[in-house]
Image (cartoon, rainbow, N blue to C red):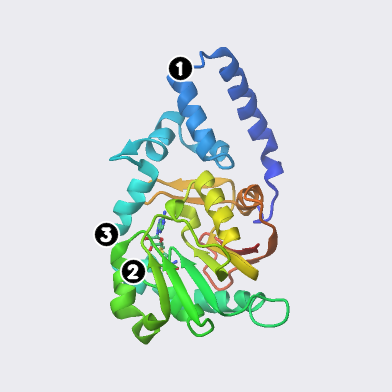
Amino acid sequence: MSDTTSITEYSGTHQAFHDHWAKTDDDMCLHSMSFHLHDALREEFFSSYLHLLEQIPLGKLHAVTCEYINGEKQFYHRAQKFYEDVTPSEEGMMGDFVELSEVDLEGSRQFLKKFVGGPGKASTKRALDCGCGIGRVSKGVFFPIFETMEMADMTEEFLLHAHEEYLGDYADRVESYYCYNLKDLILPPIRYDVVWIQWVACHLTDKDLMEFLKRCQTSLRPNGVIIIKDNMARQGCKLDPTDSSLQRHLDVMKFIIGKAGLKVLDVQKQEGFPEVMVPIWMIAMR
Ligand SMILES: C[S@@+](CC[C@H](N)C(=O)[O-])C[C@H]1O[C@@H](n2cnc3c(N)ncnc32)[C@H](O)[C@@H]1O
């Protein structure tokens, strides 16, 4: 299947699921456990859940996503645990594909150029790097262009390493570090020329991603742009329960973006990565 195949090509499968669930819902006592599991999942993964149900049984899917551990949804708890064991290094950020870091950064620089600097484009006053890790993208793409940066990540150790070591003198130009899960991060209004979201949209549920994108939109300065860069599934959606990452097909991602009230300006595939790897796409929106 091509990467741009429309989600509507799955309408047959989806219709079958819809019919099944519609019937089940009608027949079922509304207070039954199954109804609640089904409903919670649909609420959280409104665009991805049928794809997920195709691969993982309802009970297990609910457990690894919506069940709570210490007041935190398993979905987020697992990701937190996963990143606690990741070294604060470029290798850690690239998941052992560190040799592809420069290819990735160059692809980002070229894509960013389309939207920043020049008449009608975003200015270069301030950018926000979301899920920044140790600041690999900030260092390689943003600091050479932007006057100041703000950086957000849920893993404190990564932010500390960024500030104390990895960014060197660039650290003086960081206005704020936000140590938050993006699902809880409230952004100041009209502040950023670029909001960059790389390899972290995959760690948010559909609903939390949609809500976060809405908040990003209100944080944009005139001509500002939001860019998501992430692994996108060749087909449907794929959940990795180890680190709670969700690869979504580009069309599924676009649907969530549309639900957030944003307009897609451009999409581009990252070139230069081995074909065997999951395709990486960049999506610009405002
Ligand atoms: C694969 S690393 C990518 C780091 C950086 N974007 C890069 O490209 O080098 C994913 C980062 O997202 C952070 N992260 C994962 N889930 C998050 C969440 N829900 N909120 C904030 N940060 C999150 C992790 O701590 C980690 O630093």
**Side (left or right) of 249 relative to 129:** right
* Label 1 SS: loop
Q: Is residue 207 visible?
A: yes
Residue at point 28%, 78% (across, down)? 164
Could you give the CA–CA distance between mark 1 and mark 2, rounded to whole angstroms? Answer: 44 Å
Circle 3 is placed at which residue position? 85
Whether pointer 1 and pointer 3 mark residues with C-beta atoms closer than 8 Å, the reply is no
The amino acid on which the numbered mark 3 sits, given as a three-letter code, is Asp
Disc sitting over residue 285 in the figure: none
Above or below — where is 224 with respect to 183?
Answer: below
Please name the residue shown 66% across and 74% down the image. Answer: 115
Quarter of the render that holds ligand 1? bottom left
Q: Are marks 3 and 2 in contact (CB under 8 Å)?
A: no
- The mark nearer the N terminus, 1 or 3, is 1
Front tag of 1 and 2 = 2
Of the two numbered discs 3 and 2 on the same chain, state the one appearing first in sequence.
3
Badge 2 element: helix
Question: In this figure, which residue is indicated by the disc labeled 1?
Answer: 32
Work out how far the residue at label 3 is from the one at label 2, CA to CA, in angstroms. 15 Å
Viewer-proximal residue among 103 and 105? 105
Q: Residues within 10 Å of mark 3 (few under 14, many from 20)?
A: few
Q: Quadrant of the C terminus?
A: bottom right
Closer-to-camera residue (68/275): 68
Q: Which residue is mark 2?
A: 159
Q: Nearer the viewer, mark 3 or mark 2?
A: 2
Earlier sequence position, callout 1 versus callout 2 = 1
Disc 1 versus disc 3: distance between alpha carbons?
Answer: 39 Å
Q: Is residue 161 above or below residue 154?
A: below
- Asked if 7 appears above or below 87 in the picture, the reply is above
Q: Amino acid at mark 2?
A: Leu
Residue 282, horizontal then vertical, whole percent: 59, 65
